[in-house]
Image (cartoon, rainbow, N blue to C red):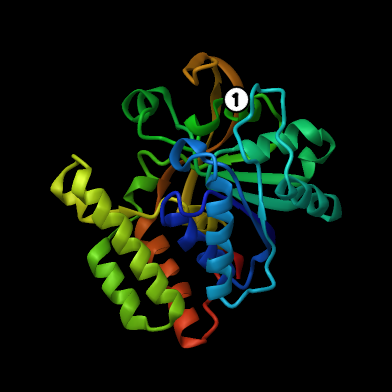
Amino acid sequence: MRVILDCDTKNEIDDQLAIAYALGSPELDVLGVVSVQNTTASGVASVDVYTAEARLVADLCGRPDLPCLPGARAPMETPSTPVGSAGLDFIVEHAQIAPLTLLATGPITDVASLVLQRPDLVERVHVVWAGAFPDEATWNRFRLGELNARADIAAWRALYSSDIRLTLLPGWPAIARVAVPWRDYSAQLRDLGGELSEFLATIIEEYSASRSSWWLGSEEAQRHKILWDVVNVAILRNPAWVTLEHRDLPTLDAAGAPDYSRPARSADVCVDVDERAIIDDLWTVLESFATGRSPVVGPANG
């Protein structure tokens, strides 16, 4: 399966895990990583920071040959104004060659720009996006916690106005269960040995410790780190681990407020996950980098 990752790597630490997970999956032909803006989280230089981080992860995974390109440097100004970039050109080039899957784990700027700039390629691309909401109740509860959609509302609106094949992986309520006790997980990574494991352990510790110092959630939640973006890869490894329902998606206003009484389009939406299977499979792949053994391909794709 031909795959391009479109990430905001280093906004958090789950993009780095998703890149390693994808590169360690022998059934995935990872063509490259495009780094999309998240100026809301990381400022105007976000793309430069994210591109450098993606390059570092690819190198640690033994892929110095992997293209890591900058995507859109800023959000779309309106739902009809695409943002050009080297990363968008890379996606267009490979979509022209053969169908591909875009694993979008950040703001949807590059995908929406593709839809607007090259509508003739829409039928050749499947987008798996970690973002947005499965229903109105979840939006009401978590709308301030979700960042990927809010970081480019114009692009979010453009995506929902398009016909591109879309699988939506909202963070809540299901994917938030894909979480690990971060102190234990970091220690186990270090026990694996190797530069990649040490790097991942360090960024998990640094991010989680800093978050625990200011976050006001429950003590139990502070002990765990949600691995949001790894589900984008897991669904390709074994679709049975992610339960989807075909649902209507709402019309969005300029502020990103949804009107579920006015459907804009429909898509396959994640409503449940097998979190244990996903966490175990990710570990198998990470372990393979340390041991040099090839991981087993996800059962449904083997």
In the image shown, does 80 or 83 lie closer to the viewer?
A: 83
Q: Position of residue 141 (x, y in %)?
A: 31, 27
Q: Amino acid at mark 1?
A: Ala
Q: Quadrant of the C terminus?
A: bottom right
Q: Residue at x 24, y 56 (%)?
A: 209
Q: Is residue 172 above or below residue 135?
A: below
Q: Is residue 264 above or below residue 226?
A: above
In the image shown, does 231 or 188 lie closer to the viewer?
A: 188
Q: Residue at x 66, y 24 (%)?
A: 161
Does the image show residue 129?
A: yes
Local crowd size for mark 1, using a 10 Å CA cut-off: few (<14), some (14–19), many (≥20): many
Q: Residue at x 16, y 43 (%)?
A: 218
**Mark 1 lies on residue:** 154
Q: Position of residue 16 (x, y in %)?
A: 48, 61
Tally of marks: 1
Q: Quadrant of the N terminus?
A: bottom right
Q: Is residue 153 above or below residue 43?
A: above
Q: Quadrant of residue 77?
A: top right
